[in-house]
Every structure is written in structure tokens, then in C-alpha cells.
Image (cartoon, helix red, strand yellow):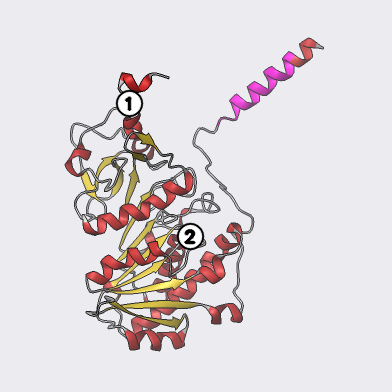
Amino acid sequence: MKSVVIFVICLSVSILAGNDTGYPAGLMAECPGMTKNTTLSEETKNSLRVVVLCPDKGWLASREESCPLDYKGVACVSKHIDLKKKTLVYISGYLDASFSPIVRALTIPYLERGRNVIIMEIYPILHRSYPIAARLTKPLGYLLGEFLSHLTHKGLSHTKLELLGGSLGAHIAYYAATKYYELTHYKPTRLTGKLYISLDPAGPCFRSLPPRDRFHSDGALKVDAIHTNIDGFGIPDPVGHVDFYVNGGEFQPSMVSDYLLPCFQLCSHVRSAIYWLIASYEKHQFVGVKCNSVAEARHGKCYYRSVDTNVLGPKTNFSRPGIYYLPTTENKPFYMGKEGLKKRKYDVNHYLLQVSPEKDMII
């Protein structure tokens, strides 16, 4: 009997060793039905809306209007914004809404620069279970693409159109861009996927899809992505012309004084929105170092003799495409500027090497 137990244990170890896949599958790599068609009812379509924000010199800094996400809504939008101005279309993530504080915060830099902002209101439809919400991203994206094509016929140039998507919203933005191109033969100027609750493109349910069936660099003339939680709510693959793997892209550091504050799945996922918001003002401070692979970026092993750099935010240089390792500090305002060009000991977890005074070690 003893020999049988030993044999079973050895066999189990052998099987596990033989099935080592190496590259982590990540959270919810596959979801049922993701490759099937999903249709929205007319009732659902009629319920969808966009929130339009227009720069204003008044004390509120912007004027706001809600319009239907359909052909009639095009006239509504055209009435309230100047279609000749640069326009940001923002699509938030799972369980988020147009009125959430972080969504509104992300629109402020664009309004301050005199741009129009159109927020796709997705909460009423994406509050369902996550796998269902993931399947709804494609039909929602196609509806948005049709809507934007009608706006282009009204005078909105593709050269002044930018799409910003967070988490599930990143995929909706991509599907919208593909439908927009199909209808107009134009590509938006910029498509950015981040992790607000992902400003980093969502990984669950999308990891195993073919590259062009999810957020992809084909979506626009300039496509960038921020990765802050690649094994959790984000996606590990480079999906843009420029991909920033912040602190390796897996988890983000967090300290207050000398106290470690764990920043795991959701915290790391949302952190990308904070990075993007700060980078909107500090346009040259989030400096990334170019890497040869995601594996190198994950461990910050990108400091070669010749260091190529790029910056996160409005000043990203798309003539320098590639994968970038972007180090930050563990405290606000996070950016390191030129200090990010110096390799740190222990990579992202360098702050764990700080030694406490001996008097603090008396227990």
C-alpha cells in the first residue's frame, strides 16, 4: 500500500512538471460566448446616451448636456459643441458611470485645453455580471462607431478625434474605431487604453481572443496602452504602438511614511487612471525606458548601455514605438523624471530594502 501511495505522488509531480506552461494565464483567461454574436434589443439601444461637456468660461468651467446615442443624438451633440474643435470620447470601465469622481477628474485636463468631451454612459447596461458585460462590449462599440461616423458627416474631423477607454471601455473604444473606419475609411488620431478600473485594457474574458478581436494597434493612427495589473484585471500583451508597463505592469507600490499599504488587484488596476491624470499635467515626468520584451519590462531589466526613452501622457512620442518599463515612486505624485533613468536595486519593490532603525525593532 505504501508503494502505491509513493507511486501516485511521483506520478502527480511528474504530470504537474510536464504541464508547466510558464507564461501565466492570468485571471479569467476565457469566458463562454465571447466569440459569439451578441445583439442589443431596440429597447436597450434607445436607452443608451452620451454626456457632452463643452469648455466654458463660467465658474463651472464646462457646460453639460445629455444626448441619445443614436442618429437623433447626433443633432443634439452638434447643437451643443463646436465640431471643429478637438474632441475626446471617453468610455469608462466595468461598473463605472459618467458621473463618477474619477471619470470627471479625467475630463478636466481636456476641458482646460479647450477640447470637447463626450462620455459614453455605459453603467445602465454594464452593471450585469462581468462575463455578460464583456460580451456586450462589441455591440456597444459598434453603436458608438456608427454614432461617431454620423458626427464626422456633420463636420467632426477624424484628425481631431481621440478615444480614451478604461478597462472594458478600452475594448469598446477599439470596436468603435473599427466600425468608424469601416463606415468612413478614416482612423481616429489617437486611441488610448488604460486601466481605469483599468485605464489598462481589460484582460478577463479577452486574454485568449485573437489579437484583432480585442484592443489593438490597428484601431487608430496612434495607439498607446498603460499596463498596471497584467495578471489580474489587465492584459499582459503589448497591444499598442507604445505600451507602458508601469513598475513592470503587475502590481503597483504603495507606502505612507514607513507603512506598507498593499496595492494588489483593484488598487493596481485603478492606479493607471491616477498616473494618466497626473501625466496630463506633468507631461514630461513619467519617463519610460525601452525594453526588448515584456519579460524584461516585467522585471525592469531594460537598462542597457544605450537607453531609449519615452514619456507617458500627451507628449508620448509615437515615432518611438515599442515596450517601455516605467518606474514610479510609491508615493504621490509618483513620477520620477530623470531619476527613472537610473536602475534601482530590487526593481519595483526597492522600498522593501529600507532598513528600520534598530530602536524600532525592539518587540
* Residue at position x 24%, y 33% in the image: 303
* Residue at position x 37%, y 78% in the image: 52
What residue range appears in magenta?
6-20
| Residue matched to label 1 | 353
| Residue 236 image offset from top left, x and y in percent | 44, 45
Secondary element at image label 2: helix
* Residue at position x 43%, y 50% in the image: 269
Give the left or right position of residue 209, taking residue 317 as reference: right
Asked which quadrant contains residue 117, the reply is bottom left
Asked which quadrant contains residue 247, the reply is top left
Whether residue 50 is visible to the viewer of this picture, yes or no, is yes
Q: Is 183 placed above or below 96 here?
A: below
Tell me the number on the disc at residue 361: none
Disc 1/disc 2 C-alpha distance (Å): 36 Å
**Residue 11 sits inside the magenta stretch:** yes
Q: Amino acid at mark 1?
A: Leu
Give the left or right position of residue 115, taking residue 226 as reference: left
* Residue at position x 51%, y 60% in the image: 94
| Residue matched to label 2 | 168
Q: Earlier in the sequence, mark 1 or mark 2?
A: 2
Viewer-proximal residue among 110 and 86:
110
Secondary element at image label 1: helix
- Location of the N terminus by quadrant is top right
Q: Is 101 placed above or below 311 here?
A: below
Q: Of helix, strand and loop, which mostly describes the magenta segment?
A: helix
Give the left or right position of residue 2, taking residue 81 as reference: right
- Location of the C terminus by quadrant is top left
- Check if mark 1's residue and mark 2's residue have beta carbons within 8 Å: no
**Residue 138 sits inside the magenta stretch:** no
